Image (cartoon, helix red, strand yellow):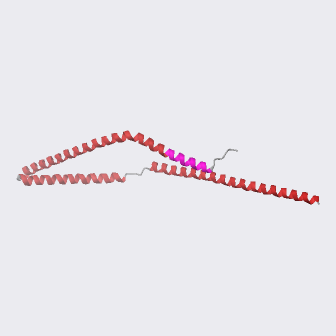
Amino acid sequence: MAERTNPKTFVNNLVVDTKSLVQDNIALAKAELAPSAKAAGVGGGMFGAAGYLAANAASLLFLAGGLGLAKLFAGLLDWSAIPAIALGFVAMAIILLLLAGILALVGKGKMKQVQPPKETIKEAKLTVASVKQSLNRGLNEVDAEVRDRKGLAVAKRAAKDLDETSTYQASSSKGATRV
């Protein structure tokens, strides 16, 4: 018969192995991510600087557009510089607001297409189910071990009681024959 593992040892091994597995995975993730995190930080800083410079350049282009529209309005409407500049910047602001509205609508449509990570969720559920099944199987084995030990203890007591009874009967029957 195969030797059964003590339930206490089984649970202790389960706890130690689980802790070890989690700690090893965390250490691996840290080792893998440390160089990447540094590179990502530097890269993110570079993208931030590029975005800042691009925003400044866009502002200058918008100003140039507003001034260009002002020049156009001054020539077409025969206005002085101040009203033409004001109208040029208002027209540029309206154009930018229209572009912002179009981009917002397109972005909203794209956001509706965002799907949850179905495979990841499915895999996580399967993992949880597998762990539960393994724990239940382990608990069933521990329960079986406990029942076997209780059954063995009951059998030993019954054998002992039977042995004591037969010894008593044997001794009393010897005493009866002596008389």
Q: Is residue 156 above or below residue 24?
A: below
Instruction: Please tell me which residue lies in front, 157 or 131.
Output: 157
Looking at the rendered structure, the number of numbered marks drawn on it comes to: 0
State the image coordinates of residue 99 (x, y, percent, origin top left): 23, 51
Q: Which residue is drawn at 25% across and 45% down?
A: 51
Q: Is residue 154 above or below residue 18?
A: below
**SS assignment for the magenta stretch, majority:** helix
Residue 43 lies in the magenta-colored region: no
Q: Which residue is drawn at 28% across and 53% down?
A: 104
State the image coordinates of residue 142 (x, y, percent, origin top left): 63, 52
Instruction: Please tell me which residue lies in front, 44 or 10.
Output: 10
Q: Residue at x 77, y 56 (%)?
A: 158
* Magenta part of the chain: 7-21
Instruction: Work out which residue is located at the far right of the displayed protein and give it.
Output: 179
State the image coordinates of residue 53 (x, y, percent, origin top left): 22, 43
State the image coordinates of residue 48 (x, y, percent, origin top left): 27, 44
Looking at the image, residue 83 sits to the left or right of residue 118; the answer is left
Looking at the image, residue 1 sits to the left or right of residue 7; the answer is right
Q: In which quarter of the image is the N terminus?
A: top right
Residue 18 lies in the magenta-colored region: yes
Q: Residue at x 82, y 58 (%)?
A: 165
Q: Quadrant of the C terminus?
A: bottom right
Looking at the image, residue 19 sits to the left or right of residue 30; the answer is right
